[in-house]
Image (cartoon, grey):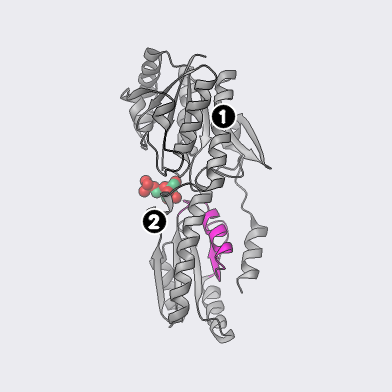
Amino acid sequence: MRKIAVLTSGGDAPGMNAAIRAVTRYAIYKGLEVYGIERGYTGLINCEIRQLDRRSVSDIVQRGGTILKTSRSEEFQHVEYQKIAADNLEAYGIEGVVVIGGDGSYRGAKDLSDNCGIVTVGVPGTIDNDLAYTDYTLGFDTAVNTALSAINNLRDTMTSHERVCIVEVMGRKCGDIALYAGLCGGAEVILVPEVKSDISQVARSIAINKRKGKSSDIIVLAEGFCRAGDLKEQLRANGINSSIKTTELGYIQRGGAPTMQDRVLAAQFGVRAVDVLIEGKGSRVVGIRNNAIIDMDTTEALAIPRKFNQDLYNCANILGQ
Ligand code: F6P
């Protein structure tokens, strides 16, 4: 393999830039030419391809977002557009592509490999931490720390006013951002899609907390459980009369400088991804398991069912009382 490309796809995540930098510099070190594809699969279809050198990726290791831009492409689900993309790669002599993104992006990479013979490797880049084959995805640690910083601020003001606060965090169908931010922020209640929770029971525990002398309650709510406004209504319907405030953290969680952990992961994932492309085996993904960097077949990786960390959830609930 002489020429490879890198793209970012789906929701951006802090650490994507650090991964682009790692892929580019390590590939050049290994004697490869590197190309950046702009706007994910949309840019691949539209042939938005430019060569990257060491200087193209200067001053980005610390930046959130992605210098390559990103998109969610409907078109790329169709084989005729995958063929156009493959023709564009062929025109540049590019044989392998690093795809930084989440599960939807991985499915695109697998299609590109299965239907068009392009070697692909996926780097897990999503704040959601919803890929079962890897313990952590790029951007998750930063997003949790951003949420945590907001929860710390909210605690100050909620305690002063003796209020209840619902903090809604992202994560799609995955409750990991809520779990880790809730545990570390000392939340009284954590609601995640993986665990059935009875709202009348939540209301009861808030009433008990008040009697116990707690001066504020923080409820960390994963967006996959329900929306903050709906939960507020339900708590009211279950007799909570004290002041309830809602804060939806939204896209604030997706931006910002990557943490040390995300930058280290970006470096390790980027290097392994280039090595995997050089080996030239179909469609693979890289990840981290038990502190070791791994790679595996994309289909196998996507077939692994996600397992929620129930023990950590139980621990957070006990410590938050
Ligand atoms: O997958 C990352 C994520 O931020 C999710 O947590 C969230 O549900 C979704 O993307 C939001 O997507 P969009 O940027 O399309 O609004």
Q: Which mark is residue 191?
A: none
Beta carbon at label 2 within 8 Å of ligand 1: no
Magenta-drawn stretch contains 237: no
The residue nearer to you, when weighing 165 against 80, is 165
Q: Position of residue 23 (x, y in %)?
A: 50, 28
Residue in view at x 54 percent, y 31 percent: 270
Residue in view at x 44 percent, y 27 percent: 6
* Residue type at the position of mark 1: Val
| In the image: residue 246, left or right of residue 142 | left
Residue in view at x 58 percent, y 60 percent: 195
Q: Which residue is mark 1?
A: 271
Q: Which mark is residue 250?
A: 2
Q: Residues within 10 Å of mark 1 (few under 14, many from 20)?
A: many
Q: Which residues are magenta?
A: 170-198
Query: Could you tell me which secondary element the residue under label 2 belongs to?
Result: helix
Vertical position of residue 200 compared to residue 67: above or below: below
Q: Position of residue 207 (x, y in %)?
A: 53, 82
Instruction: Using the rendered view, name the quadrant where residue 184 is placed.
Output: bottom right
Question: Of marks 1 and 2, which one's residue comes earlier in the chain?
Answer: 2
Query: Could you tell me which secondary element the residue under label 1 belongs to?
Result: helix
* Residue type at the position of mark 2: Gly
Disc 1 to disc 2, how far (Cα)? 31 Å
| In the image: residue 78, left or right of residue 99 | left
Can residue 182 be seen in the rendering of this structure?
Answer: yes
Vertical position of residue 172 compared to residue 272: above or below: below
Q: Position of residue 320 (x, y in %)?
A: 60, 71
Look at discs 1 and 2 and give the one toward the viewer. Answer: 1
